[in-house]
Image: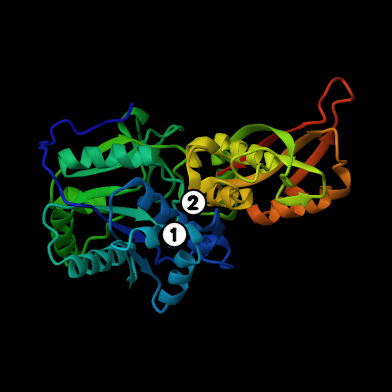
């Protein structure tokens, strides 16, 4: 069982928006020295940019300070701002500040540099919390952030932790066991470690000159500021240390959603026939409020269903005049931008067109190219099949489309 310090005096108060301090000043020697682990590719950017995104999505912070190696500010900025999703978030929220400051020779010194940078920037740091988080720990979730912040709001200091899965022993310098530890009395420490800013800052001032070596900020806070509470951690919230950690955990954490879309329109004279954004020569076209492209409409609904963001009618109500004769490629692109902003990417899209006339197959490759261009995905991730009604009835005056997709994040 995880232990929690029950004697901590807990008080509730309304705090100002928290600050975030991300430590990324290490050398990543255990990664083989080929690339700094925080700058390795992940999702729409890097490990570091993914950490930043998770805090921007999961908290109300307007200040993120990142420590970087000496002389490495440009590389750190590139690792963060090359992520299109980070840039979109910052564009929507211009009050958010992303700061960079050089670290020190130890993690303790780097954190203290970051705290000083935050204090210098905010001027007034009373009544705020600061979350100190490893820049190589990208799989933090909003649920864990909420849990840890909530406890820190009450107690002034909190961190997530897990009970060790294996039996622990204490040994001496010769490797001889000196103590048999009980797992129920131990905890494996994770980040973010969240503190009352002024208390952790003052604690760091004292720790800087006391001649002691501290392994993390909870030890410093515990010595100079008071007890620290724990909350249940997350086994997936690992710190990237070796090359295999990133691949394994990314695969384990990937979320997969499927979506299904369908649309049908009558074919009438006086309208153009659009399928997949391509005009198909024919004497009839879809009777619809927009341009009537059943294939793009089915795709749009499939993508919205998989991402959980609604349906095509909620985005583009048919009763609104501004969508009359609208280009369905623009509608799809608008929806897809929203979906990708939420972190989703397309694994594959499979579609069926059901139409008696005209023959669709001659236009299939052009349609696939059109769809992949709108979604900005490889053509081999999109496929479209065609079926007829096999002369089972009077189906010459309608067209149907079915679409299924696989999204991941």
The image shows residue 42, relative to residue 323, as above or below, that is: below
Query: In the orientation shown, which residue stands out farthest toward the top?
Result: 392
Name the residue nearer the viewer: 293 or 387.
293
Residue name at image x 21 percent, y 69 percent: 121
Q: CA distance from mark 1 to mark 2?
A: 8 Å
Q: Is residue 188 visible?
A: no
Q: Secondary structure at mark 1?
A: helix
Residue name at image x 41 percent, y 42 percent: 141
Residue 151, image quadrant: top left
Residue 308 is situated, as x and y percent measured from the top left of the image, at 50, 35
Other-residue count near label 1 (Cα within 10 Å), few / some / many at <14 / 14–19 / ≥20: few
- State left or right for residue 369 relative to residue 137: right
Q: Are marks 1 and 2 in contact (CB under 8 Å)?
A: yes
The image shows residue 100, relative to residue 355, as above or below, that is: below
Other-residue count near label 2 (Cα within 10 Å), few / some / many at <14 / 14–19 / ≥20: some
Q: Is residue 111 visible?
A: yes
Name the residue nearer the viewer: 144 or 294.
294
Mark linked to residue 341: 2
Q: Which residue is mark 1?
A: 88
Residue name at image x 24 percent, y 65 percent: 112
Q: Secondary structure at mark 2?
A: helix
Residue 262, image quadrant: top right
Name the residue nearer the viewer: 218 or 177.
218
Query: In the orientation shown, which residue stands out farthest toward the front?
Result: 270
Residue name at image x 33 percent, y 28 percent: 184
Residue 86 is situated, as x and y percent measured from the top left of the image, at 44, 59
Residue 54 is situated, as x and y percent measured from the top left of the image, at 41, 50
Instruction: Name which of mark 1 and mark 2 comes first in the sequence.
Output: 1
């Amino acid at each position: 069982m995880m232990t929690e310090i029950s004697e901590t005096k807990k008080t509730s108060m309304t705090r100002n928006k928290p600050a975030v301090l991300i430590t990324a000043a290490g050398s990543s020697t255990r990664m083989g020295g080929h690339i700094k682990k925080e700058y390795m590719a992940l999702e729409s950017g890097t490990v570091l940019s993914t950490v930043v995104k998770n805090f921007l999505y999961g908290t109300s912070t307007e200040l993120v300070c990142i420590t970087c190696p000496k002389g490495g500010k440009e590389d750190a900025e590139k690792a963060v701002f090359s992520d299109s999703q980070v840039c979109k978030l910052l564009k929507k929220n211009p009050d958010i500040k992303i700061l960079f400051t050089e670290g020190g020779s130890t993690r303790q010194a780097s954190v203290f540099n970051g705290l000083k940078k935050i204090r210098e920037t905010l001027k007034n740091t009373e009544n705020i919390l600061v979350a100190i988080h490893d820049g190589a720990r990208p799989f933090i979730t909003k649920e864990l952030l909420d849990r840890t912040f909530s406890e820190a709001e009450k107690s002034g200091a909190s961190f997530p932790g897990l009970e060790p899965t294996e039996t622990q022993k204490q040994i001496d310098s010769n490797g001889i066991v000196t103590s048999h530890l009980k797992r129920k009395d131990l905890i494996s420490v994770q980040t973010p470690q969240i503190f009352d800013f002024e208390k952790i800052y003052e604690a760091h001032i004292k720790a800087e000159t006391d001649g002691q070596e501290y392994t993390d900020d909870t030890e410093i806070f515990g010595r100079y500021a008071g007890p620290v509470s724990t909350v249940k951690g997350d086994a997936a919230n690992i710190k990237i240390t070796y090359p295999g950690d990133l691949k394994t955990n990314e695969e384990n954490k990937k979320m997969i959603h499927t979506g299904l879309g369908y649309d049908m329109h009558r074919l009438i004279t006086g309208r153009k026939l659009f399928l997949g954004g391509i005009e198909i020569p024919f004497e009839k076209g879809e009777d619809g409020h927009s341009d009537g492209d059943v294939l793009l409409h089915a795709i749009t609904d499939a993508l919205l269903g998989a991402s959980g963001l609604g349906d095509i009618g909620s985005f583009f109500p048919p009763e609104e005049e501004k969508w009359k004769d609208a280009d369905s490629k623009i509608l799809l692109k608008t929806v897809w931008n929203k979906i990708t902003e939420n972190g989703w990417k397309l694994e594959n899209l499979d579609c069926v067109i059901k139409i008696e006339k005209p023959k669709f197959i001659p236009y299939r490759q052009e349609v696939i190219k059109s769809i992949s261009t709108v979604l900005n995905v490889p053509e081999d991730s999109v496929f479209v099949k065609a079926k007829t009604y096999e002369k089972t009835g009077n189906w010459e005056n309608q067209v149907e489309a079915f679409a299924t997709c696989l999204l991941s994040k």
